Image (cartoon, rainbow, N blue to C red):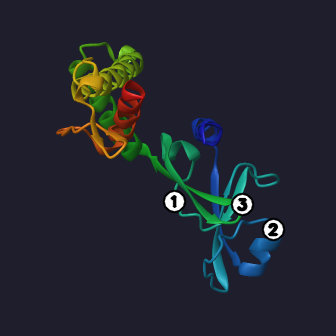
Amino acid sequence: LAAVEAEVNSHVIENINVTTRLMESEEAVAAGAIALFGEKYGDEVRVVSIGASEVPYSTELCGGTHVTRTGDIGLFKIIGETAVAAGVRRIEALTGAAAMAYFDTLETTLHETAELLKASPSDVPARVEALIEERRKLERDLVDIRRKMATGGGEDMANSIEYVGDIKFVPKSFEGIPAKDLKNLADDLKKQIG
């Protein structure tokens, strides 16, 4: 996507001439115009060519381009892509003032995020990465603390063993422990009481 965006912007900056002609559908396709899948075209179509008439950079049926030179498009920014058919992708992009507004929104968001993190905008990725790692460590520590509290804070569980027939049983009530942590807790208790 970055390569496509760079290529399009390079042609936009070149301010290449855009020509528009009305042609018959078959003649336009035979001349190399690209027809979009699923589009319905009449007998006469609008053909848009970008670049020299002998070897244009792009020739499309309509194409939605209503400019006289590529520079009229302004900035081109891809904002998404989706599958259209097997091996065919559709890109969604903004141009001109809409692209600039998109960048303004991103810049505002970046500066607000940097302010919240008390970091410069260029340090935001590293700061977010550090916060994610810190959160992971705290979650691991919390699981360990919950496990220790639930198992008596390191007390010997052998003193709490009761027998049901000849089966060892440790009566414990656990509150505030996520279900995903209970299996590890049970394994710890089994190790302690043998």
Instruction: Tell me: residue 135, above or below residue 175.
Output: above
For disc 3, the marked residue is 87
Which of the two labelled residues, at mark 3 and mark 1, occupies the earlier sequence position?
1
Alpha carbon separation for disc pair 1 and 2: 20 Å
Q: Quadrant of the C terminus?
A: top left
Which of label 3 and label 2 is nearer to you?
A: 3
In the depicted view, which residue is nearer to us: 82 or 63? Answer: 82
- Kindly state the secondary structure of the residue where label 2 is placed: loop
**Residue 118, quarter of picture:** top left
| Left or right, residue 30 beside residue 163 | right
Which of the two labelled residues, at mark 3 and mark 2, occupies the earlier sequence position?
2
Provide residue 91's location: percent of width, then percent of height: 56, 54
Residue displayed at 72% across by 79% down: 25
Provide residue 187's location: percent of width, then percent of height: 41, 34
For disc 1, the marked residue is 66
In the image, farthest residue toward the front: 165
Q: Answer few, some or many: residues within 10 Å of disc 2's Cα (few below 14, many 20 plus, some between 14 and 19).
A: few
